[in-house]
Structures are given as structure tokens and as C-alpha cells.
Amino acid sequence: MKRYLFIMRRLPYSGTHLQETLDAILTAAAFDQHVALLLLDDAVWQLKNLQQPIGQGLKDTSAIYKALQIYDVKELYVEHESLLAAGLTGADLLLPLLSVSRRDVSDLMRSYDLIIPD
């Protein structure tokens, strides 16, 4: 089984790209692939609690993030420095994430067969 690491860097609700990436994650997971997610830079805002994108005409993706566990996507990583730069803590997020330091990101990436950036 291939090990996929999806890497997200973009702000939430900056277009349809987030929804498309989440669909790709769920599709890979539905076919019993080992899937993980790493949030870097502005992507840490994607899991911020209490977002309200309705006024922007975009779909609320929080339910999809919560469904990741159902699809056995259990390795959810956040770069520690990105979280700090955003002024967020684990308590501000929808889901618990595994924190990885910037210096360890490349090691994490090497542990996967395929890297899929957003």
C-alpha cells in the first residue's frame, strides 16, 4: 500500500481548491490507501474553530475535516512554527493535530511514498 502525504499551505476559503484537495484525500482514503495530511503556513487557519464561510458562498469544510477519522485518515500534522505564527493553539482547532517542528518536516516527508502539495 502506498503512503500518501497531502500538504496544504493555502488559506481556507480562498476558492474551490480546498474542497478539491479534501475530495482527493477522501477518495484516496476510500480506496484503502494510507493517507496523511500536513498543514503548513496559512493552512493552519483551515482548522480554526467556529468558521462561518456562508457569506462567502463557499461550503463549510469543517464537517469534511471531522469525517477524516471515519476514512482512517488519522495522521494529521501541523507545523508547530506555522501554528505559532498564526497565534493559534491546539485548543483553537477543530481536531487534535500532531505537531511537527519545521526542522522535522523533511524527515516526515521522506517517510511517505507520494507527496501531494495543494
Image: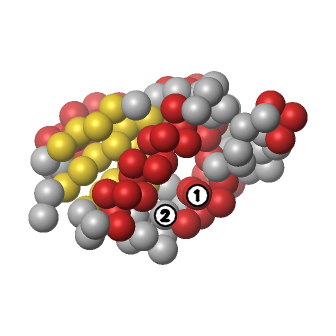
Circle 2 crowding by C-alpha within 10 Å: few under 14, some 14–19, many from 20: many
Q: Secondary structure at mark 1?
A: helix
For disc 1, the marked residue is 64
Determine the image quadrant of residue 12. top right
Q: Amino acid at mark 1?
A: Ile
**Along the viewing direction, whichever of 72 and 101 lies nearer the viewer:** 72
Q: Residue at x 64, y 49 (%)?
A: 61
Side (left or right) of 37 relative to 2: right
Q: Position of residue 56 (x, y in %)?
A: 80, 31
Q: Position of residue 53 (x, y in %)?
A: 78, 39
Q: Position of residue 114 (x, y in %)?
A: 18, 43
Q: Position of residue 55 (x, y in %)?
A: 87, 34
- Whether residues under marks 1 and 2 lie with C-beta atoms below 8 angstroms apart, the answer is yes
Q: Is residue 92 visible?
A: no
Q: Amino acid at mark 2?
A: Leu
Residue 52, which numbered label? none
Side (left or right) of 57 relative to 26: right
Q: Residue at x 46, y 50 (%)?
A: 23
Determine the image quadrant of residue 36. bottom left
Q: Quadrant of the N terminus?
A: bottom left
